[in-house]
Amino acid sequence: MYSRKFSRLILGLYNRKTSAITAVQSPGGRSGFSWSAVCRQRTRWLRRDGALEVQRGVPCQMSARSISQSTVDPSEVKRFQSLASKWWDEQGEFAALHAMNDLRVPFIRDNLLNVHPGRQGGKPLTGLRILDVGCGGGLLTEPLGRLGADVLGIDPVPDSIGTAQLHSSHDPDLCERVRYQTCTLEELSAEEEGGGGETANPLRRFDAIVASEVVEHLADLETFALCCSHVLKPGGSLFITTINKTNLSYALGIVVAEQLLRIVPSGTHDWEKFISPVELERLLESNGFSVQSVQGMLYNPVSRAWSWTNSTAINYALHAVKLKEEHPQTDQTEEPGHS
């Protein structure tokens, strides 16, 4: 009885607050921002970090320094290391992530089918290569593999990768399509700089990258965005689910979810690491992505189910596409006397 009344109170608070928030943000999160100002701000960031050598008329390339910067927060690694054996407990600490698959798997599948039309059947993602960043125990990696995709799950926590490998080994259907690797995104990206590894051949880059409930745990989002662009094929898709940085997300995502209802372990989230859809869109677009859609998500602690909502005040899902690279035209002028 108490939990139902409390849930109605929370949902009522959510409904009252979101109308004010959605009035500020357009559905695409584009209002009130200047593209030129975004570019100038990004240049300042990269100059500050020594990550960009500005060259007139030349597309920005990833520098060795930006690759060496780490997206990993050691405190986050330590926290998830302690939870590594609990990934597949559907009633435990990761129950909300298990339930989120009902939304995020169709969201990824349907958007990929829009980008790659003509696919059908029981394994519509066959032939597509997907990178699952921060895969944990493989909660999202496995269902994407069952849809036919070749999926590489990466995570900096060795025990989480061990849990993922052990769980997938029980399903023969996944053995050839799902693989795991203990590494960071920037380490995978650096393999291309060194001429080896997964992405050394441009044809071996990924058709899609998934980072679900990951960016709010990262230490450096600029490096994350640069590395995503680096290992993704032109025209490839980036899928992100994360938490908005609002007063409501603090009240519900931390105070209620962690401290009162214990939906997730206390200390799982740091509100300062949350990012709004507008800020995330600015970051991605300054790194060569075009944001296609942003959709709000809402978790009901009583039914333990997720649903789509028009408001992005708490959780949201984003789909972006990497713009196709423009190759500079070469001078076709022939020297005299040559045919």
Image: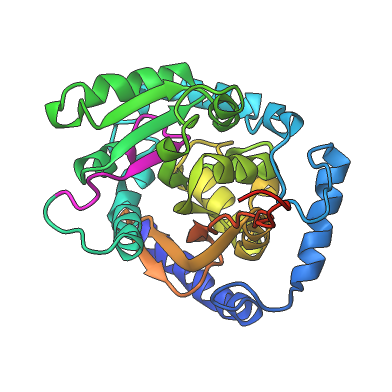
Residue 64 lies, in percent from the top left, at 72, 29
Query: Of residues 73 and 226, which is closer to you in this image?
Result: 226
Range of magenta residues: 123-141
Q: Quadrant of the N terminus?
A: bottom left
Q: How many marks?
A: 0
Q: In front: 102, or 33? A: 33
Q: Position of residue 225 (x, y in %)?
A: 62, 46
Q: Residue at the front extreme?
A: 337
Helix, strand or loop: magenta stretch: loop
Residue pictured at 36% horizontal, 17% vertical: 162
Residue 170: percent from left, percent from top: 16, 23
Q: Is residue 222 magenta?
A: no
Q: Is residue 253 above or below residue 139?
A: below
Q: Nearer the viewer, residue 292 or 137?
A: 292
Q: Quadrant of residue 195?
A: top right
Would residue 287 be seen by someone viewing this image from the given angle? Answer: yes
Colour scheme of the rendered structure: rainbow
> Is 139 one of the magenta-colored residues?
yes
| Residue 332 vs residue 22, the one in the foreground | 332
